[in-house]
Amino acid sequence: MVEAAFRGRILHKFVETLSSEIGHETFSAVLSKAGLPEEWAHPAHFAALDDVHNAQAYARLQSVLRTYYGRGARGILFRIGAKLWEPLLDDSAIGIKAQAAVIRGIPKSLRRKPALELLARILSMSTGEITVHTLDLDLLLVDRASPTTRDQSDDTPICFVTHGMIRECLYWAVGQEHDIEERACRALGAPQCEFKITIGG
């Protein structure tokens, strides 16, 4: 099982987007109710953390949102994931931007897997941490680290932010919505998180 770690720049964008989505006052109330410091509402607070503590903070923030909003947290986290895709791409290294330009230049029908591999490259801390596989006509994204699930346990999948990023990444690539299902999640005790993207039929 891969040890969860997380890039500081992605956590920074996540906190920024979260604050924008629910409002700074509400964000502060969520933190207060969970007994977390007010400083967590400010992206700059996380600048000094290492990658493992970034992962802990990322998972903790999503956990307190799920507690505070109950079922409504799914939609909020999903929207945050969707809104993260373009800023993360814009903030990426030149090699990733070059890869994105190549993807946009190939026929739409061939873009889905390379687009998901691009997302995997943006999110991964190491090679092979997130991989994309072909399932007949469909695709499967496998996340072996899944920082969302760090120290988390639930009876349903919880990786709503990742789900939102996958959907927005595919929409960016081909201009279509896709049916995406998190069919395995480390929060349920699975060894990895798996997202099935239905393309065929």
Image (spheres, grey):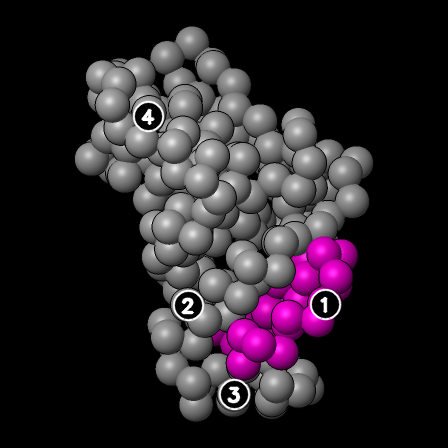
The disc placed on residue 17 is 2
Mark 4 in CB contact with mark 2 (< 8 angstroms):
no
183 part of magenta stretch: no
Q: Amino acid at mark 4?
A: Ile
- Label 2 or label 1, whichever lies nearer to me, is 1
Quick check: 47 above or below 41? Answer: above
Quick check: 132 above or below 42? Answer: above
Q: Earlier in the sequence, mark 3 or mark 4?
A: 3
Callout 4 crowding tier (Cα within 10 Å): few <14, some 14–19, many ≥20: some
Image x and y of residue 55, in percent: 68, 58
Q: In front here: 47 or 176? A: 47
Residue drawn at (36%, 72%) of the image: 21
Mark 2 in CB contact with mark 3 (< 8 angstroms):
no
53 part of magenta stretch: yes
Residue drawn at (27%, 28%) of the image: 104
Overall secondary structure of the magenta section:
helix
- Label 3 or label 4, whichever lies nearer to me, is 4
Placement of the C terminus among the 4 image quadrants: top left
Judging by the rendered image, the residue that carries numbered circle 1 is 49
Mark 3 in CB contact with mark 4 (< 8 angstroms):
no
Image x and y of residue 163, in percent: 45, 45
C-alpha separation, residue under disc 2 versus residue under disc 3: 14 Å
C-alpha separation, residue under disc 4 versus residue under disc 1: 33 Å
Which residues lie in the magenta part? 42-70
Q: Amino acid at mark 2?
A: Thr
Judging by the rendered image, the residue that carries numbered circle 3 is 28
Callout 2 crowding tier (Cα within 10 Å): few <14, some 14–19, many ≥20: some
Q: From the viewer's perspective, tell me whether residue 52 is left or right of residue 141.
A: right
Quick check: 52 above or below 101? Answer: below
Mark 2 in CB contact with mark 1 (< 8 angstroms):
no
